[in-house]
Image (cartoon, grey):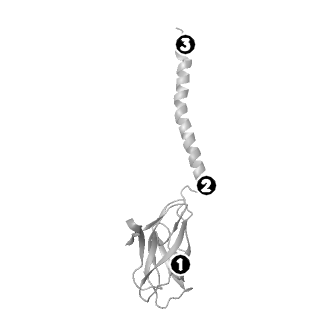
Amino acid sequence: MTEENLWRPSRRRLTDTLLAALAPVAACSLGLGGLTTWAGAGKAGSPPRITVSNGRVLLSYAKGTDTAAFFDIANVGGADDRLVNVTSTATNGRITLSGHRMLGGGAAYKADVPSAGVPAGDVLSMSPHGVDVTLRAGAGWRAGDLVPFTLHFERSTPVETIAVVVRPSDSGL
């Protein structure tokens, strides 16, 4: 064997080396392409962006009784968030988040829940069949009155909104 042949790698060894390097390069390129698409869609590092609309409070049948409020909460951001508290200067007493669960035979029950998820790119539409806000009705509320609320989130800044007082039959729920 000549000295020149000792220093020249064989074609097979060169081909094997290139094939071994191709797999990680292809995987990195695929991952980078996915991340570029995600970032281009505006989702990379995007915090939750919360909007609240369609606030309604059911008109109570008697003074001093509990009633429910409902909101549509949209998260147009790139990260999930959670509604953790609701406050209002127009009510007396405790305000809670409630969840309604169905039992067999058409029966249901209400239970306080600590929070309600608002997934990224999705809407939490409160209803009597899911999550709602339970509160003490204000004295003298009439259909059409506006009630101020502040919704507090785990990651987002609080959102101030209003809900209109509606008769249960007119609520669309």
80 relative to 107 in the view: left or right: right
First in sequence: mark 2 or mark 1? Answer: 2
The residue at the point 49 percent across, 91 percent down is: 140
Q: Position of residue 161 (x, y in %)?
A: 54, 77
Amino acid on which the number 1 mark rests in the picture: Arg
Give the numbered dot on residue 41. 2
* Outermost residue to the bottom: 140
Q: Position of residue 55 (x, y in %)?
A: 54, 76
Give the numbered dot on residue 56. 1
Q: Is residue 105 above or below residue 148?
A: above
The residue at the point 42 percent across, 72 percent down is: 98
Amino acid on which the number 2 mark rests in the picture: Ala
Compute the Cα span from label 2 to label 1: 34 Å
* Outermost residue to the top: 1
Compute the Cα span from label 3 to label 2: 54 Å
Per the image, the residue denoted by label 3 is 5
Amino acid on which the number 3 mark rests in the picture: Asn
Give the numbered dot on residue 119. none
Could you say which is closer to the camera, residue 52 or residue 40? 52
74 relative to 101 in the view: left or right: right
Q: Nearer the viewer, mark 3 or mark 2?
A: 2
Q: Secondary structure at mark 3?
A: helix
